[in-house]
Amino acid sequence: MTEERRLNFGGKWTYAPALESATVPIAPRYELFIDGKFVPPKGGGYFASINPATEEPLTEIARAESADLDAAVAAARRAFEPWSKMPGRERGKYLFRIARLIQEKSRELAVIETLDGGKPIKESRDFDLPQAAAHFFYYAGWADKLDYAFPGRRAKPLGVCGQIIPWNFPLLMAAWKLAPALACGNTCVLKPAETSSISALHLAQILQEAELPEGVVNILTGPAETGRALVEHAGIDKIAFTGSTEVGKQIAHTVAPTNKKLTLELGGKAAHLIFEDAPIDQAIEGIVAGIFFNQGHVCCAGSRLLVQESILPAVLAKLRDRIATLRVGDPMDKNTDLGAIHSRPQLDKIRELVGGAVEEGAELIQPSCSLPGRGYWFPPTLLNGVTATHRVAREEIFGPVLSVMTFRTPGEAIERANNTPYGLSAGIWSDKGSKVFDLVSKLRAGVVWANTYNKFDPASPFGGYKESGFGREGGVHGLLSYVKLE
Ligand code: NAP
Ligand code: MG
């Protein structure tokens, strides 16, 4: 760590305890990132960010007030003209630089992600960080090729984009939002989730190191109120929101009477279908990865398992055995499979939905595992005998809990899979290609994985049907969310 980096955040650095590396800095305090500089909030307020695996505070983070929001939007507006007029190949160079810096710092960023969010270090290291860099690399490549993305049309940037992200993949969601917006020539005001803002502020430091022009990206930390004020701000041209369907609906309502453009990436309740002709052992691995990845804090988590009736006993027995081998505990241990639940309210919600399912008649299957005394934990859980009317089958649980249901025929599988207000993702396990193709065309879900699950690539669009939102992130489609075509 250089002296210059210490100065950027100011104050005395603390080091995360018991880490393999003492080079992981968590500053004692984080400021707002406005107009290329770290600045204290005008109202002087700070809030704590804690480690959910220990309940210990990690640092304190600036709380943005409306005067800070005005300053951030004004900075983004000033930056818009030079940034949008800059040749695409020049903008692309900044994005490539950011991507490379993320790669260089991926070790420390992965540790921050795990300490602040509770996710296993092997996931931060092998998924969140490589994917975040990949998104910047991918959109860096589009910056000077927009004419080829939209042949015969002129793609113009929208202006100042307000971007609001959730806590489950903090740095990756920042990358999903910023990279395409910047490639298209927009400027941004990004609001991270209150409980997981640290990595976004380290990203801000990377933007400084990449010498991104001042004001092109501004990062405002704060509670839901900060997000609401951003949505309402008259100086914003577009809102891109990833989060819950409930908040997404409120935002759609606020934006409706304005000229602001809007894209929403919301919740999900994915059906994961397993047919009697599936390669069962492979399918079990896919099903386990589909629901226990990131403790189930995944919008596209395969939380409803639909099993063809004839293979239910075999599938249940194998799942029961497999979840008993999952290691739950210290997210910083590289062998951990399930880390901490992200927050107390999320843990309460998981407990409430599981409790309700048992009262409604579902069978609870949990391996005996010892959970740490402090922190927020929930064991890997199966709920057998769930029916479509159970609350746990209808509401997003966002936790390590798989609801198991059955079907007899492919037609019944489709009907049950589509029986949800959500439509983000789905999964199919079957040996028959023709059956898979037929099902894919009938599943009302934005992404359908076949004989795999949770596979991501920046070139591949991601987004929802129905109450899972509208607009796509990733791929050429992701550019469309940030341009007007003339
Ligand atoms: P959330 O409560 O909707 O919050 C998302 C973000 O919006 C946070 O930054 C939050 O700030 C902010 N916010 C809260 N209320 C707001 C309001 N009224 N106006 C503007 N902003 C507001 O969701 P979450 O609990 O953080 O995230 C989990 C949800 O995100 C799940 O439903 C999940 O499915 C969804 N998700 C979807 C995708 C996708 O691509 N479709 C990806 C990941 C997650 P605070 O943190 O300060 O409250
Ligand atoms: Mg935290």
Image (cartoon, helix red, strand yellow):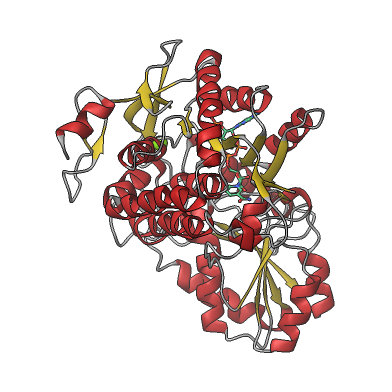
Query: In this orientation, does residue 461 appear?
Result: no
Q: Residue 382: x and y, percent?
A: 57, 62
Which residue is painted at 54% across and 40% down in the image?
85
Q: Give residue 273's quadrant in the image.
A: bottom right
Query: In this orientation, does residue 447 appear?
Result: yes
Q: Is residue 19 left or right of residue 318?
A: left
Q: Is residue 468 left or right of residue 28?
A: right
Q: Residue 176: x and y, percent?
A: 53, 50
Which residue is painted at 69% across and 57% down in the image?
424
Which residue is painted at 59% across and 65% down in the image?
460
Quadrant in which the N terminus appears: top left
Q: Is residue 246 above or below residue 485?
A: above
Q: Is residue 412 left or right of residue 250?
A: right
Nearer to me, 146 or 238: 146
Q: Is residue 411 above or below residue 264?
A: below
Quadrant containing ligand 1: top right
Q: Is residue 371 left or right of residue 475?
A: left
Q: Residue 458: x and y, percent?
A: 52, 61
Q: Residue 269: x and y, percent?
A: 68, 56
